[in-house]
Amino acid sequence: MIVSLPEPPMASARSMNARVARAFAPASVGNVGVGFDLLGHSLTGSGDHAEVRRIDEPVVRIAAIHGCVDGLPLDPLRNTAGTALLALQHALGLPYGFELVLHKGIALGSGMGGSAASCVAALVAANAMLEQPLAREALYPFALDGEAVASGSSHGDNLGAMLLGGLVLATHDRLLRVPVPAAWHCALVHPHVVLETRKARAALAGHYELGEFVAQSSHLALVLAGCYQGDASLVREGLEDVLVEPRRAPLIPHFAQVKQAALDHRAMGASISGAGPSVFGWYENRTDAEAAGAAMRAAFATAGLDSDVWVSPINGPAAALVDSLNTKPTP
């Protein structure tokens, strides 16, 4: 299990007097179906890189953005990573600032936490250059400020998973790592279409029945209990989103067929990753997850959509310092 701690002493000492640091933040599955804005887990295989340079002027500049996304703003007040660094700089009263270069490995509007990964990677890199680096939980409020730029609201489901790794329950004030059996895996399939987070959130407007909230709460409780006990039967009973999925499913081409393909391969449950259009399933072993990923990709293909597949332990990695920027994250 990965435990949330301050940066290791060797990493801090190595970077404390440095003028530049680089970090990687992994992709993630937001909401995990039943934990809207609260629950997420990280993924291996895709993510964003950030290179942060310490500068003498107490400002934040975005020098460049490379990778799989075009047209992102260089104005730090309109950029998730820039806003997160500004929040850190202002809160700590730093007499210096930061210059940022981002390399995007996660497509925006994919439901894989692309906006969150940028601000987490930038914060982890900047944190390494502080004289007294902060614990990961202490970076969370600054990441929330950054995430709000992308979606219009502060929610930590992706952020918590990236900061701590694995499955994380993220309230507005706390992050809690949730234990998951090492054998459990996720299959995530990302179709090559864009679904903007703001549009997906707009689909949730309207009236909700009290019974829907009660059912969703019971499902979340079952999933958390199942994870803590390592009991897949509890997760199977609970991993069904009755609140958000029905309202977002029409935004995703062939969603019903893709979800059914996931369930047909012994999934504990399947739903929309984040705001979509990616779809995920949870499995008790990697073999089932790999077979499901191929079937889900084939289901998207029947709608004329190509897609990418990631298979990852649910106990995915946390954001970390790296020696160099990897310019080609591999699915």
Image: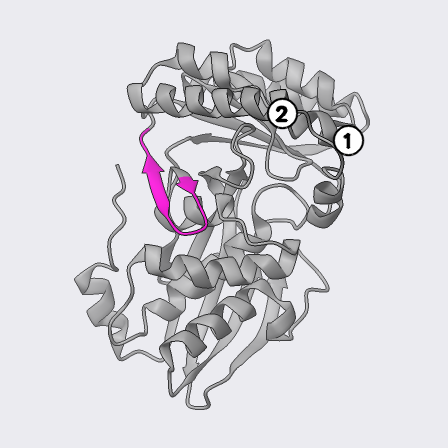
Q: Residue at x 45, y 64 (%)?
A: 142
Frontmost of labels 2 and 1 is 2
What's under tag 1, amino acid-wise? Leu
Q: Residues within 10 Å of mark 2 (few under 14, many from 20)?
A: few
User: Viewer-proximal residue, 81 or 13?
Assistant: 81
Q: Judge left or right: residue 258 versus residue 134.
A: right
Q: Residue at x 35, y 47 (%)?
A: 164
**Cα–Cα span, label 2 and label 1:** 37 Å
x and y percent of residue 48 in the render?
Answer: 52, 55
x and y percent of residue 64 in the render?
Answer: 60, 72
N-term mark: 2 or 1: 2
Circle 1 residue? 305
Q: Quadrant of the N terminus?
A: top left
x and y percent of residue 141 in the render?
Answer: 43, 60
Q: Residue at x 38, y 88 (%)?
A: 95
x and y percent of residue 186 in the render?
Answer: 48, 27
- Residue 210: which disc? 2
Q: Quadrant of the C terminus?
A: top right
Q: Residues within 10 Å of mark 1 (few under 14, many from 20)?
A: some
Boundaries of the magenta span: 169-179
CB under 8 Å between discs 2 and 1: no
Residue 256 shows in the view: yes
Residue 325 shows in the view: no
